[in-house]
Amino acid sequence: MNPEPAPSETDPYPDTRAGRDAWILARRTGIDRTVGLDPWRPSHWLRETEPDPLGGQARILTVFLTNRECPWRCLMCDLWRHTLEETVPLGAVPAQVRIAREEDRLRASEPPRWLKLYNAGSFFDHRAIPREDLPGIARQARDFGRLVVECHPGLVRDTTVLPFREALGAGTTLELALGLETAHPGVLERLNKGVDLGGFRRAAEWTRNHGMDLRVFVLVRPPFLDEAEALEWACRSIDFAFDCGAQTVSLIPTRAGNGALEWLAARGQFAPPRPETLEAALAHGLGLDRGRVFADTWDLDRLEPDPVRRESLRRRLEEANRTQRMRSV
Ligand code: SF4
C-alpha cells in the first residue's frame, strides 16, 4: 500500500481530522522548540494575583511545568514549542513543583494562597504527568487553598480526575481549566480540538457535579472569522461558558507562532483581534455579572504594535482584571 502523500505547501486546510493533523504538523517545519528544557526543572514560574471569589486579591504561584507534548493537534496551538518529545522521569514533576516553591519562598515576602500548575497540555494526560506522581503533587498542593490545572475536556472523567481529587483532600478547591475556544460549532470543528459543544458541556457538567470549580478559556478571534464575527462569537462563547457552569472565563487573543496560523494569515483566513475587540468582549463578560472574566495580557505586543497605546491598553486590561469592572471612557 502506498503511504499517504505528505501535505504540500499549497494544500488547503483539510476537512478530516487525520488530514488536519498532518497538515498542522507539516506547518511546524522551521519552527523550533525551546532548547535546554530540563525535565527536573519547571519551564518557568511567576507570581500573579486574581480577585478572590470571596473578596480581596489572591496571591498565586503559577508554575509552568516541563513535560511531554500534548497529543492533540489544535490548529491554533503553539504550546508544543515549550514541551519535550518524551515523558519525563518518575519524580520529575513533583521535583519541579518543589523547586518553584523553594525559589518563590526565597524571593517573596508573603506566601501564595493559590497554586496554578500549567503544563502546556492536560494535567490528567498520564504521558505528560505520570499517574504515579499525582499523589506527590497532591501532597504539595494541599498547602494551598486552591489548585488550578488545565485539561482537555476529553480527559475529564472518573478514572483520571477522581483519584487525584481524593488525594488532594477537602481543604483545597480543585479548579479545572478547560479550553472551549469558541462556541461557533463550525470553527470549533476546524480548530481540530476533537471536541464539540456537547462534549464540552458534558465535561463542564461533570466538573461541577463533582464539586470542582470550572475555568474556561475562550479564544478572541480564532481563524475563519472576520472582526465583527469575532466579537459576536467571543460574546456568545462567554455566554455558553457561563451556561455550562463556569465561575471564571479567561479571554485569550489568538496569536500566530505555530506556522499554521501564519499560513492562514497569508491567505486572509486569520488575523489577530484588534485591541478594541478584546476590550469589548471583556466588557460584555463583565457586564453579565455571572462570574469572573479576565483578558490575557501576556502577548499584547502582537495586538498593539505602538508602545504608548500598548501600555495604555495593558493598564486598562489589568485594572479591569483586578477590579472586575471596565473603566467608563
Ligand atoms: S488541547 Fe490544548 S495544549 Fe493540546 S494541542 Fe489543543 S490547545 Fe494545545
Image (cartoon, helix red, strand yellow):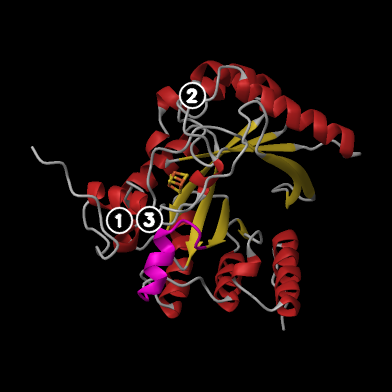
**Extreme residue in the bottom direction:** 329
Residue located beneath label 1 in the image: 189
Quarter of the image where one finds residue 167? top right
x%, y% of residue 197?
Answer: 34, 52
The mark lying in front, picked from 1 and 3, is: 3
Residue 28 or 148: which is nearer the viewer? 28
Q: Earlier in the sequence, mark 2 or mark 1?
A: 2
Determine whether the beta carbon of the residue marked 3 sits less than 8 angstroms from the nearest atom of ligand 1: no
Residue located beneath label 2 in the image: 162
Task: State the extent of the magenta-drawn residues as a range.
Answer: 254-268
Estimate the spatial distance between the alpha carbons at disc 1 and disc 3, rounded to whole Å.
Answer: 19 Å
Bin the neighbour count of mark 3 within 10 Å (Cα to Cα): few under 14, some 14-19, many 20 and up.
some
> Against 142, is 18 above or below?
below
Determine whether the beta carbon of the residue marked 2 sits less than 8 angstroms from the nearest atom of ligand 1: no
State whether residue 298 appears in this view: yes
**Mark sitting on residue 27:** 3
Q: Is residue 145 magenta?
A: no
Residue 110 or 36: which is nearer the viewer? 36
